[in-house]
Image (cartoon, grey):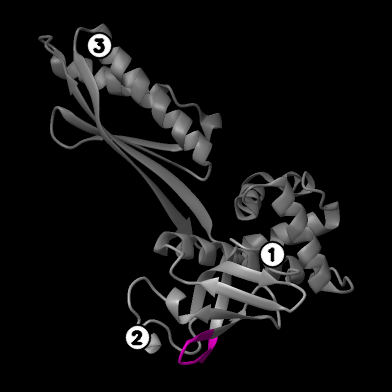
Amino acid sequence: MRKSFPTVGELVIGIVRTIEEHGVIVELEEYEGLEAYVPRSHIASGRVRDIRDFVKEGERVVGRVIRADRQKGLVDISLRYVSRDQARRKLAQWKEKRRIISLIRMAAERLGRKDPEKIAVTVWNKLARYYDSPMEAIIEAMRTGPDVLKKAGLEDELAQALLEEARSHITTPIYMKVIGIKLISFAPNGVEVVRKALLQGIKAVSAEDEVEVDIYSVGSPKYVVRVKSADPKAVRRISSEVVGTILKAIKREGGIGEVAWEKSYKKRIAPEK
């Protein structure tokens, strides 16, 4: 997993090893054996009276490279040039990469391949070059099959082995969209008009869509449409079609229909044992 050498501006992850009077020495996680220095002025914004108020030995931190001298092997990083959101994303990406490389290594070991660590890094690089998110690609493969992995250049046997490891160790995400709508009918049989409009929404979904759709009342004239699936694209498409069908149906009968609010969720379901 080692990279060659960090570049200026790059976000890096390090473990705090030594706290000194004028700065901190960290061991860079992605560059085995390489240390970086955090000057006191780059520990945090504002005045730093005691460095230990901001970092502790053994703590994992995210910094931005402000100096990188490959010839001398010297790297300086700044902690104050990294926002909390940037640090959170960087750590999440790093943990995800480690997890995927571990799965690939286990797949290679299962197949009895030589140098599974090298294979793991090579396969990771293939996935990262072909897909913006290797983890999302693996999750898609869990849903649709190994062809998703083969497209990135994985050979059949390894793609299947990786898929099996993923199914054993990765929780499957379920995507859900919940939309609140308001339906009003001025017809004498208004209740029936609304009921038929909601039924039209249900009929807009076919068995091939592989989604779960629920529609229920939260007190007239408010209703909720909930769509769930392992396929996020299907959730977005079907929720739009269902709500669109309902609103058109109520308006055809002279009523009023509108979207009041909508929310999206992502839950994870543990793998079956």
* Residue at mark 2: 53
Tell me the SS state at disc 1.
helix
Instruction: Pick the quarter of the image with the C terminus.
Output: bottom right
Instruction: Give the amino acid type for the residue marked by disc 1 in the picture.
Output: Glu
Do the residues bearing badges 3 and 1 touch, measured as CB atoms within 8 Å? no
Bounds of the magenta segment: 16-24
Real-space Cα separation, disc 3 to disc 2, in angstroms: 62 Å
Q: Residues within 10 Å of mark 2 (few under 14, many from 20)?
A: few
* Residue at mark 1: 165
The answer, for residue 215, to whether it is visible in the render is yes
Q: Residues within 10 Å of mark 1 (few under 14, many from 20)?
A: some
* Residue at mark 3: 251
Do the residues bearing badges 2 and 1 touch, measured as CB atoms within 8 Å? no
Q: Earlier in the sequence, mark 3 or mark 1?
A: 1
Q: Is residue 94 left or right of residue 189?
A: right
Real-space Cα separation, disc 2 to disc 1, in angstroms: 42 Å
Instruction: Pick the quarter of the image with the N terminus.
Output: bottom right
Quadrant in the picture for residue 9: bottom right
Q: Earlier in the sequence, mark 2 or mark 1?
A: 2
Instruction: Give the amino acid type for the residue marked by disc 3 in the picture.
Output: Lys
